[in-house]
Image: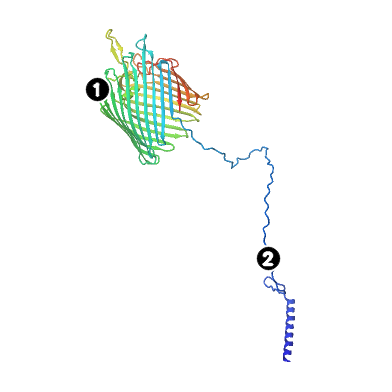
């Protein structure tokens, strides 16, 4: 009974609960984000579709390329801008052609003229090279005899020069060794072949200089042993030999960027055998300071020169240069320089090979050479230089007539027209130089200088001094493989003495042509003294009139 009552009570309670829940569900407000009730009515069993299916990759088909016809744009359109990126051209490797290191020239012409030259540069290695050189020129012909209008002078003069030079480049220095040989054969006036002269010279050279710009102390030094022999002399028919030891050095160092200080030294020891000439020594010192930047180039120094045994013992001269660049291509400059020029046997041959020694000759000393000028390039390829100055020379070398008394008539005649002597001279000068170069097809240069000379004690020392000189040189190539050249030289000399004596002016026009008819092989021809003028290169000695020289040259 009790159990029965208990079951009825439980059923009633469960039913009341169910009705209450349904009533609450009907009155329950709608779910919100904050209040949401989920009513589970069925059991949920998730099923993954195709979970047991086998995964098979689809078959890949090979792509098919469809060839289409290329269409090109053939219409023209104006470019509005330069493209920023373009295809770079295919360029082959550039190789520099090997330079020709050999040269040979042989020619001959009227008056027995000969011309022979050979030069070969042997490049042993990138650091070693050997240079061989040979040159011979001269003449043998009949020239006007100034002492005899009826007979010609059978003149000849041959010069031969040869040298060998070796150079080696170290890491920071350069060494050079050389040997030189010279020979001159000629005859004097008025003799034909009886009085023959021969000058023989040779020297050995050793030099070394720095090549590294970063070195604290830079240098350039050399020493030379030189020998020179004159076979005959007017008053001493025996040979005369001069030996010379020449030493030169330049040492400098940078004290800051663009500023250097240095010292130049030159010493000459001259030893003589024959003719009663005395040995002597010269020592030349030149301390200097130089400054260089974009606009200025300045050098301030002085020459302090000693002579032991010949000439004045001590001499001074300036060594000052100042250049200023303006307007990018113009330079205004001022100079005051000087120094010694030795009158050794080599210099005497350059001045006049026909001259004879009668006494010891001191060195010519340039006491001062001061000048002002301006140079520049107004247009591309054109250069000019206008200048003026004053020069003072001590013991200036000049030539005088040698005379002899004729035994039969007791008349003074010129036997040997040239003797050497010294005197002091001065000259004021002014001139201009102009040159033009157009694409290597035209090269023209011209120089004109006027000088006013004075001499201390012998006005005849000015006979061969140039009063006005003009030089013109032009090379042009109007046709391929042809090179034409024109040269003109005019030298007017002063008149001296009461009779206003003059040796005459030089008036020389020469023409030249060079034609390369095959690779490396060329024909050359020269016409000298085209107007066949009479003039003297050396005091008292005539020169060739109209003459021609032709020959062949070869580069290899």
Using the rendered view, name the quadrant where residue 287 is placed: top left
**Quadrant where the N terminus lies?**
bottom right
Q: Is residue 25 left or right of residue 466?
A: right
Q: Classify mark 2: helix, strand or loop.
A: loop
Q: Residue at x 74, y 83 (%)?
A: 15
Q: Where in the figure is residue 378, as x and y percent of width and height? A: 49, 30
Q: Vertical placement of 54 versus 28: above or below?
A: above
Q: Is residue 422 left or right of residue 109?
A: left
Q: Is residue 23 left or right of residue 246?
A: right
**Quadrant where the C terminus lies?**
top left
Q: Where in the figure is residue 301, as x and y percent of width and height? A: 34, 34
Residue 340 appears in the figure: no
Q: Nearer the viewer, residue 375 or 245?
A: 245
Using the rendered view, name the quadrant where residue 54 is placed: bottom right
Q: Where in the figure is residue 238, as x and y percent of width and height? A: 27, 19
Q: Vertical placement of 273 versus 417: above or below?
A: below
| Label number found at residue 249 | none
Using the rendered view, name the quadrant where residue 249 is placed: top left
Q: Nearer the viewer, residue 517 or 294?
A: 517
Q: Classify mark 1: helix, strand or loop.
A: loop
Q: Residues within 10 Å of mark 1 (few under 14, many from 20)?
A: few
Q: Where in the figure is residue 335, as x and y percent of width and height? A: 38, 31
Which residue is denoted by mark 2 in the rendering?
52
Residue 64 appears in the figure: yes
Q: Are marks 2 and 1 in contact (CB under 8 Å)?
A: no
Which residue is denoted by mark 1 in the rendering?
276
C-alpha gap between disc 2 and disc 1: 133 Å
Q: Residues within 10 Å of mark 2 (few under 14, many from 20)?
A: few
Q: Residue at x 69, y 63 (%)?
A: 53
Mark in front: 2 vs 1: 2
Way the structure is coloured: rainbow
């Amino acid at each position: 009974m009790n159990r029965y009552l208990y079951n009825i009570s439980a059923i009633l309670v469960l039913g009341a609960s169910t009705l209450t829940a349904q009533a609450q569900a009907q009155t329950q407000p709608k779910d919100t984000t904050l209040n949401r009730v989920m009513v589970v009515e069925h059991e949920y069993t998730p099923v993954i579709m195709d979970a047991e299916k086998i995964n098979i990759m689809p078959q890949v088909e090979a792509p098919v390329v469809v060839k289409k016809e290329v269409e090109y744009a053939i219409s023209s359109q104006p470019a509005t801008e330069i493209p920023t990126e373009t295809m770079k051209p295919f360029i082959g490797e550039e190789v520099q052609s090997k330079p020709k290191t050999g040269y040979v020239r042989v020619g001959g012409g009227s008056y027995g003229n000969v011309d022979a030259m050979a030069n070969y540069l042997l490049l042993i290695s990138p650091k070693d090279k050997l240079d061989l050189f040979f040159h011979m020129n001269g003449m043998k012909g009949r020239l006007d005899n100034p002492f005899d209008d009826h007979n010609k002078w059978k003149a000849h003069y041959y010069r031969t020069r040869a040298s060998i030079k070796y150079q080696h480049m170290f890491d920071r220095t350069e060494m050079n060794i050389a040997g030189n040989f010279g020979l001159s054969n000629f005859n004097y006036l008025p003799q034909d072949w009886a009085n023959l002269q021969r000058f023989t010279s040779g020297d050995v050279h050793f030099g070394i200089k720095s090549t590294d710009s970063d070195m604290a102390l830079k240098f350039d030094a050399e020493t030379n042993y030189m020998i020179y022999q004159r076979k005959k002399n007017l008053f001493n028919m025996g040979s005369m030999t001069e030996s010379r030891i020449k030493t030169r050095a330049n040492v400098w160092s940078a004290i800051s960027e663009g500023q250097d200080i240095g010292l130049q030294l030159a010493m000459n020891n001259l030893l003589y055998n024959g003719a009663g000439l005395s040995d002597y020594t010269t020592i030349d010192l030149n301390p200097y300071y130089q400054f260089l930047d974009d606009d200025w180039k300045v050098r301030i120094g002085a020459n302090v020169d000693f002579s032991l045994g010949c000439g004045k013992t001590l001499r001074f001269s300036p060594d000052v240069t100042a250049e200023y660049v303006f307007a990018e291509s113009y330079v205004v400059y001022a100079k005051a320089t000087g120094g010694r020029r030795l009158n050794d046997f080599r210099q005497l041959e350059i001045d006049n090979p026909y001259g004879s020694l009668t006494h010891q000759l001191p060195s010519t000393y340039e006491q001062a050479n001061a000048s002002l000028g301006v140079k520049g390039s107004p247009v591309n390829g054109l250069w000019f230089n206008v200048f003026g100055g004053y020069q003072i020379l001590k013991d200036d070398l000049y030539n005088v007539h040698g005379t002899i008394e004729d035994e039969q008539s007791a008349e003074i005649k010129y036997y040997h027209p040239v003797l050497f002597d010294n005197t002091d001279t001065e000259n004021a000068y002014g001139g201009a130089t102009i040159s033009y170069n157009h694409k290597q097809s035209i090269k023209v240069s011209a120089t004109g200088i006027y000088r006013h000379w004075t001499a201390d004690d012998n006005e005849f020392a000015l006979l061969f001094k140039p009063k006005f000189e003009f030089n013109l040189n032009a090379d042009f190539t109007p046709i391929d493989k042809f090179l034409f050249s024109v040269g003109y030289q005019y030298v007017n000399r002063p008149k001296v003495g009461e009779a206003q004596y003059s040796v005459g002016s030089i008036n020389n026009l020469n023409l030249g042509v060079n034609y390369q008819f095959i690779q490396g092989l060329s024909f050359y021809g020269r016409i000298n003294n085209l107007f066949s003028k009479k003039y003297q290169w050396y005091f008292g000695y005539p020169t060739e009139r109209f003459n021609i020289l032709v020959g062949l040259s070869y580069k290899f």
